[in-house]
Amino acid sequence: MSKAKDESDNSIKPSGGEGPGNPVIEPPKITSPANGSCTTSLRPTIRGTSHPGRNIRLVTPGKEDALSPEQQPRVRDVQLTFQQDLKPGLNEFQILQWLRYPDSHKRSPVWQLYYLSAPRITSPSAGATVGRTPQVKGDSAIPGATIDVVKAGTAAVIYATGVVASDGTWIADNKVALPVGPFTFTARQNKGGVTGTAWAANVSVTVTG
């Protein structure tokens, strides 16, 4: 590296920090969706603010990976969209902001977002014969979410409902008697006023009176 290059770097570096003659560099912030809220979008858009002219991207807390494409916005209000699918359940992330040197790095507080994926039905099993008020059991859901069991193809009648336990398992107690004969059901979860759009795999049973 040449001496001229060194001097050029030194002349730029102070602008990455704060001090006499430099403005206070605002740390990035996330403003929406609400922290701890739920989404049905696999690649949601995150809104917030950052210091104009700084590079920003969504990252895993404490890391420098790229959960979203990098931007260098010239305005304070920003939008960052995930470039990979959210994982089922809890997702944590933050905005990383920097100029070009490590000492310019600033991070937003860690943010949490729940993706409402499809729950899994474990009982009764496909092909089983059941009474008119069976319990429906499953897993792979978000703790605290509500599970609704309905007839496949329509959510007009909720036949069973239950709350997800801390380990993601759930038991939905029957509220409306099933009709006698062949019956195919499915389930979805909802939490925080957000209803999931992903349905559990259909289960077909025979209902006896």
Image: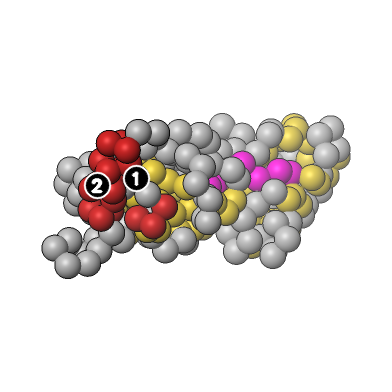
| Residue 208 x %, y % | 82, 42
Q: Label 1: state its secondary structure.
A: loop
In the rendered image, which residue does mark 1 sit on?
Answer: 100
Q: Quadrant of the N terminus?
A: top left
Asked if the residue at tag 2 contacts the one at tag 1, i.e. Cβ–Cβ closer than 8 Å, the answer is yes
Magenta residues span 114-121
Mark 2: few/some/many CA within 10 Å (<14, 14-19, 20+):
few
The reply, left or right, for residue 84 in relation to residue 48 is right
Q: Which disc is residue 12 wearing?
A: 2
Reading the chain from its start, which is encountered first: label 1 or label 2? 2
The colour scheme applied to this rendered structure is: secondary structure
For the question of whether residue 31 can be seen, the reply is no
Q: Nearer the viewer, residue 56 or 127?
A: 56
Q: Residue at x 25, y 41 (%)?
A: 8
The reply, left or right, for residue 50 in relation to residue 117 is left
Q: Nearer the viewer, residue 170 or 20?
A: 20
Q: Nearer the viewer, residue 59 or 182?
A: 59
Q: CA distance from mark 1 to mark 2?
A: 9 Å
- Say above or below: 106 vs 205: below
| Residue 70 x %, y % | 36, 37
| Residue 52 x %, y % | 20, 49
- Say above or below: 117 vs 32: above
Q: Which residue type carries mark 2? A: Ile
Q: Which residue type carries mark 1? A: Arg
Q: Quadrant of residue 207?
A: top right
